[in-house]
Image (tube, rainbow, N blue to C red):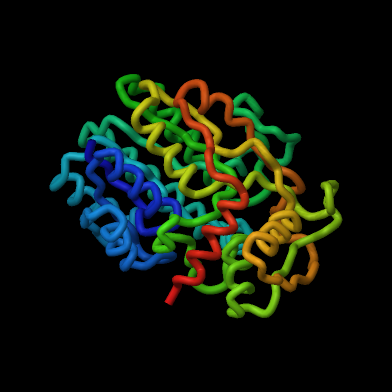
């Protein structure tokens, strides 16, 4: 199939592009480069021997997207082009609502106009709000704790409502947890522009002396050591989840969690990084961050049963590959 990947030069999008190409799919990438770099296209080529067509387009721009859809005959869309920083979303909610909702609506309209058969949406465990884990697809969608999570929930509703009227379409909502790690080649990984919003790139920047220390937001949660617990999943396993959804999901609208099912605290992750990579990570405990909750981890049994997908890479692989990538950043 020919697949449009929006946000395809980003962290998860680039890894997904690699997995799709390895599986024989044709990939076209769209990205506005607001949080990524165009040289990722060359890195994908080094890994796959395929030069992926790239178009610098903001997905809020319907006319530019429409022109691309006219020129190409897409079979599917995998939509990653959303803003994703929880903390920033609480400070700039309108930016998040405009970008995340409008880009999704534009792509759904073009799916309809050009009769595209598949739409895979990059959603998030934040749609579950603050409730006990493990979280399954049957867990109720609660009031989210931040605008980022609310945009994901609203986009899911938009796509689900659209799917009700088009039973011939395959729409998959992938709720994933906390991707970390990098491609084993050391060529692809997470490179945030500015201060990292996610934990692992902050850890690796401390390890490489780009930053003096790690700030841990709160140690008074009701968890094993007081720090937040999350379900960390290797980005390559996550990318393979998108491939499984593309190849195996049924028509209609389906929802799947993508996680390991194991919760790991911030301090446990830091200690694992230190042990595996033999590097000290100085840190300081600071106040809780707005919008954060204590514990989130997944039940991914549905994805295993229906998509034959499961994770294969360990937390040790995650921290090893993350550091390997950081060492290769020029």
Answer whether residue 53 is visible to the viewer in this image: yes
Question: Residue 105, located in which quarter of the rendered image?
Answer: top left
Left/right placement of residue 206 relative to residue 187 reads right
Return the x and y of residue 269 as percentages of the image width and height.
Answer: 69, 56
Closest to the observer, 164 or 219: 219
Return the x and y of residue 99 as percentages of the image width and height.
Answer: 44, 55
Residue at image position (75%, 62%) is 217
Closest to the observer, 76 or 11: 11
Question: Residue 165, located in which quarter of the rendered image?
Answer: top left
Residue at image position (72%, 35%) is 133
Please identify the quadrant where the N terminus is shown: top left
Question: Residue 328, located in which quarter of the rendered image?
Answer: bottom left
Residue at image position (37%, 67%) is 37
Left/right placement of residue 238 relative to residue 143 reads left
Return the x and y of residue 273 as percentages of the image width and height.
Answer: 66, 61
Answer whether residue 150 is visible to the viewer in this image: no
Please identify the quadrant where the C terminus is shown: bottom left
Check the image and name the residue furthest to the left.
71
Left/right placement of residue 45 relative to residue 239 reads left
């Amino acid at each position: 199939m020919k697949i449009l990947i929006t946000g395809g030069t980003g962290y998860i999008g680039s890894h997904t592009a690699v997995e799709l190409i390895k599986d024989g799919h044709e990939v076209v990438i769209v990205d506005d480069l607001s949080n990524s770099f165009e040289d990722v296209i060359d890195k994908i080529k080094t890994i796959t021997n395929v030069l992926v067509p790239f178009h610098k387009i903001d997905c809020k721009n319907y006319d530019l997207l429409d022109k691309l859809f006219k020129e190409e005959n897409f079979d599917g869309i995998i939509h990653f082009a959303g803003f994703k920083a929880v903390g920033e979303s609480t400070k700039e909610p309108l930016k998040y609502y405009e970008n995340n909702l409008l880009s999704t609506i534009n792509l759904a309209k073009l799916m309809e106009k050009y009769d595209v058969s598949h739409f895979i949406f990059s959603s998030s465990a934040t749609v579950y709000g603050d409730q006990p884990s493990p979280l399954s697809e049957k867990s109720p969608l609660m009031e989210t704790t931040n605008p980022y999570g609310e945009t994901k929930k609203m986009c899911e509703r938009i796509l689900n409502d659209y799917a009700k009227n088009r039973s011939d379409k395959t729409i998959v909502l992938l709720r994933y947890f906390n991707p970390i790690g990098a491609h084993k080649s050391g060529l692809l990984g997470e490179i945030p522009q500015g201060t990292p919003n996610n934990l692992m790139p902050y850890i690796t920047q401390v390890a490489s002396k780009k930053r003096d220390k790690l700030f841990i937001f709160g140690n008074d949660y009701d968890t094993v050591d007081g720090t937040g617990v999350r379900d960390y999943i290797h980005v390559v396993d996550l990318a393979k989840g998108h491939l499984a959804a593309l190849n195996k999901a049924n028509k209609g609208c389906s929802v799947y969690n993508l996680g390991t099912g194991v919760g790991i605290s911030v301090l446990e992750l830091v200690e694992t990084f230190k042990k595996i990579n033999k590097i000290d990570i100085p840190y300081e405990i600071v106040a809780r961050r707005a919008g954060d909750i204590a514990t989130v981890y997944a039940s991914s049994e549905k994805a295993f049963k229906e998509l034959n997908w499961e994770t294969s890479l360990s937390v040790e692989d995650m921290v090893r590959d993350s550091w390997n990538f950081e060492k290769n950043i020029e």
